[in-house]
Structures are given as structure tokens and as C-alpha cells.
Image (cartoon, rainbow, N blue to C red):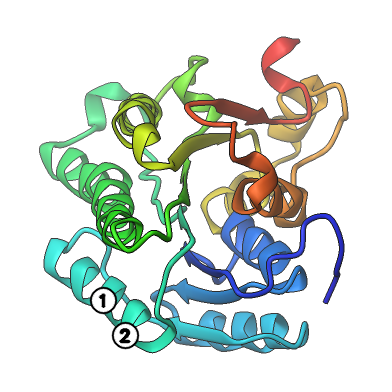
Amino acid sequence: MVKGLFDLTGKVALVTGGNGGIGLGMAKGLAMHGATVVIWGNKPEKNERAVEELRSFGGEVRCESVEVSDEGAVRDAIQRIVDEFGRIDTAVANAGISIGRGSMFDITNEDWARIEGINIHGVFYTLREAARHMLARGETGDRGGSLISISSTSAIHGAARNEHYAATKGAVLTMSRAMAVELGPKGIRVNSILPGWTRSDLTEKLQGWDKFNSNVISRAPVGRWGDGDDFAAIAVYLASDHSSFHTGDSIVIDGGYTIY
């Protein structure tokens, strides 16, 4: 556990999709700096490995399987966190899916419904219910909280055959800005992270494709894939009190891909 400027001791953080990739990287950063961490994930073996790794930092860790597209399930799971730990200080809405298709003409209504359910509705339900608790806590004099959504660089640059995914990530970006305006007067800040090409289950097939690596990944000035650990520090900063004047932002972490 790291003490110092960004000490998160006493804070409780939720990370959806926190059992791998970007979510686990962020959860590790939070746990390393003293936060109690709750992760939501739907794959038992990945959950177990993630919990074991997070507990190695010495803090409290909980894991639960929650279907984020289910409004009632999210509400109940948020309440369980509050019941056990008394508070939620940071909520990271990271859970998301991608549905690969050969072209835009192959994207079905079912694809749209599924990807919207998790990537848009799931983010909204998670952040809204966390905010509901933060507002109630604020009425007792304990104001504040940090909401973090995970968008994507797909929200700001074009990617063929990715229209449905890009649409959901653009929605996350604008939704987070609206939340920042509404919740700012109550001391709750809302920021969105836009990851570039990052190693995760969603990109597993692409990682081993030589043509993709030579034509796409090589374009990034840093010349490599991102890893979950590349997102640990931003999670710690946004969860800390030192980001209290930072809200409504869209923070691109992509190795420079979108500027080149």
C-alpha cells in the first residue's frame, strides 16, 4: 500500500468490469493506494484471480456478479456496498462489450439492443445509483464523490465496421458531461476516460494479428498496445481529493494514437 499525496485510505471505490484489462488496472491503482475496492465481473475464474491480486495490497476487496444492464440489479448491488461499507466515494463505470461485424450492413437490431444495454444503460445505471448515494450522504454534511465513465477513442475518431460500438461510446462521453453539469453544484465530479487500443478480452483477436499491429498499432507514437496498468494512475488521481476542481473532462489515454 502506497501512502502520501494520493492516499485513499478510508475511501470506497466501485469498478465495474474490474476483473481484467482497464478495469483491473484501475482497481489495482485504487487498492494500492489504500481504497476499499469492490469489483463487478461476470466470469468466476477471472473474478477469483482479480480478487487475489487486489488483496495482495492489503486492503478490503469484494467481488460480485452484477448484470449492469439490469436497472434493479444495479440498484440493489449499490445498496449492498453502502450497507457493508457505509459509503461509495468513487464509481468507475468500465463494464462494456464489443460486437464484431463484417460491415455496417451486418449490424442487427439485436446487436444494437445488446450493446446499448451494457455500454450506455449500464453506465448510466451505475453512475446514477452511485450518485444517488453520494447526494444522500451530502445531505448529512459529507459532500463529494467522483464518477468515472470509460468511453473510448472510438467516440472521437472513425473506425470502420464499428458504428454501433462508437455510438455507445459517444453517448457515454456526452452523458458524462451532462452529469458533470448537473452534479457539480453538489460537489460530485464526473469525468470520462477515452482509452486507445488496449490489451483486454475485447481486443484479444486483434493482438495477434500481424497486419493490424503493423498498420494500426505502429501508428501510435509510443508504438505499442496499452495495458490495464496504464490506467491505474488516472483512477487514483480522479478518486483523490486532489481532483476536486477537475470535472466534465474527456481524458484521452491512447499513446498518442489520435493525434497522429
Q: Residue at x 33, y 37 (%)?
A: 183
Quarter of the image that includes the C terminus = top right
Q: Is residue 86 visible?
A: yes
**Where in the figure is residue 210, as x and y percent of width and height?**
76, 38
**Residue that sits furthest to the top in the current view:** 260
**Compared to 48, does 39 lie above or below?**
above
**Where in the figure is residue 160, as x and y percent of width and height?**
45, 20
Q: Which mark is residue 93?
A: none
Q: Residue at x 40, y 28 (%)?
A: 173
Q: Quadrant of residue 133?
A: bottom left
Q: Quadrant of residue 73?
A: bottom left
**Where in the figure is residue 11, as x and y percent of width and height?**
57, 69
From the viewer's perspective, is 165 left or right of 46?
A: left
Q: Which mark is residue 83?
A: 2
The residue nearer to you, when weighing 99 against 253, is 253
Q: Which element is circle 1 on?
A: helix
**Residue that sits furthest to the front in the current view:** 141
**Where in the figure is residue 153, as x and y percent of width and height?**
55, 26
Q: Quadrant of residue 234?
A: top right
Quarter of the image that includes the N terminus = bottom right
From the viewer's perspective, is 68 left or right of 215?
A: left
**Compared to 36, does 33 lie above or below?**
above
Amino acid type for the residue under numbered disc 2: Asp
Q: Which element is circle 2 on?
A: helix
Pointer 1 residue: 79
From the viewer's perspective, is 177 left or right of 77?
A: right
Assess disc 1: are there few (<14), some (14-19) or many (≥20) residues with their C-alpha within 10 Å of its C-alpha: some
The residue nearer to you, when weighing 52 against 58, is 58
CB-based contact (under 8 Å), mark 2 and mark 1: yes
Q: Is residue 65 visible?
A: no
Mark 2 → mark 1, Cα distance in angstroms? 6 Å
